[in-house]
Image: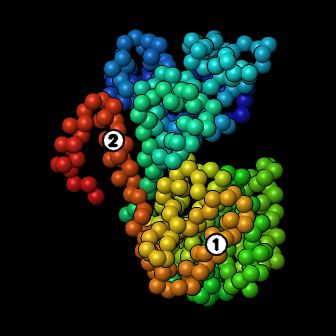
Amino acid sequence: YPYATGTKAMSLKRMVLMARASLQMLCDRKIIPAVIVTNDWFSGLVAPYAREQFYGPTFDNTTFYHLIHNGEMHYEGRIYIDPKADTYPYVHQLNPFYLINHAWKDIIINPTRAALLASNNWGTVSPSYRFDLMHNSSLGDLLFKFWHPYAFPNGIPVHLREQQVFAVCGGDHAKAKAMLQQKYFNGRVDPNIPLFVFVGRITEQKGIQLITWSVRELVHYFAGNIQIMVGGMANMSDPYSSARANEIMDLRYHMPHCFWGNPHEFFTDGALVNCGADFGLMPSLFEPGGIVQHEFFGAGTPVIAFKTGGLKDTVCEYIWDTKTGNGYTFEGYNSGDFMWAVHRAYGTFKNAEHYAQLRKNAKDSVIDGSTVAWAWLGEFYRMRGREAEFAERVSTTVIP
């Protein structure tokens, strides 16, 4: 398990085991893939072991592709080494150049660096996040050495999600909203009160403080005619999460008809919320691609999001004049900009014609997982120089 606690040597051993066991299994089963895709730092040593001939020429004709789902500094898999300690060469047995950039001030074993040095290409989960990585990552020099890093947004299995939504409320937005209001707001059921919902982990990355710090002002401004839910658990050992959890419980205690949250329990009404919310909330500090917006879109629910990473590519401001857009966005990462986005959303909710159009736009903008799969398959064919074969395959395949 990559996140297990232990010594630095043990953390490195887990990565070595993951890489070498995977390659050895392929050898034992006589499976030599045309493409091997590694995902994030924990599988970062796979390509180096193949390239360094630990398995002879077995993988010489294999294309190695490294997928960066999250390339933030704290998600590179860094292991910081004391200058007086060794760098565990007896553990990894690789050329140290793969793992350590000696031009850096600190001595750091970095498996993401290793993956980029040994792979044929890399990709990520949205075009905007690709740009952010290439211009802001500490590994930018390595990211830029590739001619054609690929990026495509995430998606969801739309048909499956529709079945889940139908099972809980028949796919009826009004019914689902009434069920949520009855269950979470002490029976205050009113279709004219807009319902804003966040679903996810109570972490700094998800921007929960923009919600908790804005609730009182929003409730006061709208004279109590607003309802806000925060569905997700908090890690009480984390200072940020525990602080937000305390704020959530305080807001729920003082405003039970306008706010609900329970950071001590896993939230289980995700499908019902996707359909019943009037707006989904995604004030994430950063979001490489994002899945939650598509879960809302799949049920026709627009989203309010901070313009970051993959959210910039998938959530677009609704414009009344053109009736385009699937939600509302804000560009300043502060409660003022967040609340102004909520105000614009509230105004659209109060206009039946525009709100109906907004829900339709949201529904039309969901990305299906099959679309994502075909896009990535095309990239892998391109890497192998088989574009014509892929084009023929697409032309003869019925894509749902």
Counting from the top left corner in percent of width and height, residue 85 is at: 76, 14
Residue at the location (51% across, 42% down)?
130
Q: Quadrant of the C terminus?
A: bottom left
Q: Position of residue 300 (x, y in %)?
A: 46, 72
Q: Which image quadrant is residue 277 in?
A: bottom right
Q: Amino acid at mark 2?
A: Leu
Left/right placement of residue 87 relative to residue 119 reads right
Foreground label between 1 and 2: 1
Q: Which residue is drawn at the image coordinates 73% and 25% (left, top)? A: 80
Q: In the rendered image, which quarter is residue 179 located in? A: bottom right
- Up/down of 361 relative to 153, above or below: below
> At label 1, which amino acid type do we have?
Val
How is colour applied across the structure in the image?
rainbow
Q: Quadrant of the N terminus?
A: top right
Which mark sits nearer the N-terminus, 1 or 2? 1
In percent of width and height, residue 175 lies at 51, 83
Q: Are marks 1 and 2 in contact (CB under 8 Å)?
A: no
What secondary structure is marked by label 2? helix
Q: In this rendering, is residue 232 above or below 302?
A: above
Left or right of 339: which side holds 179?
Answer: left
| Residue 45 visible to an observer of this rendering | no
Q: Which mark is residue 342?
A: 1
The residue closer to the viewer here, 332 or 293, is: 332
Q: Identify the secondary structure beneath mark 1.
A: helix
The residue that appears at 41% across and 58% down in the rendered structure is 367
- CA gap, disc 1 to disc 2? 39 Å
> Would you call the spot at circle 1 few (<14 residues within 10 Å), some (14-19), or many (20 or more)?
many
Q: Position of residue 356 (x, y in %)?
A: 46, 80
The residue where tag 2 is placed is 377
Q: Residue at x 51, y 83 (%)?
A: 174
Q: Is residue 316 visible?
A: yes
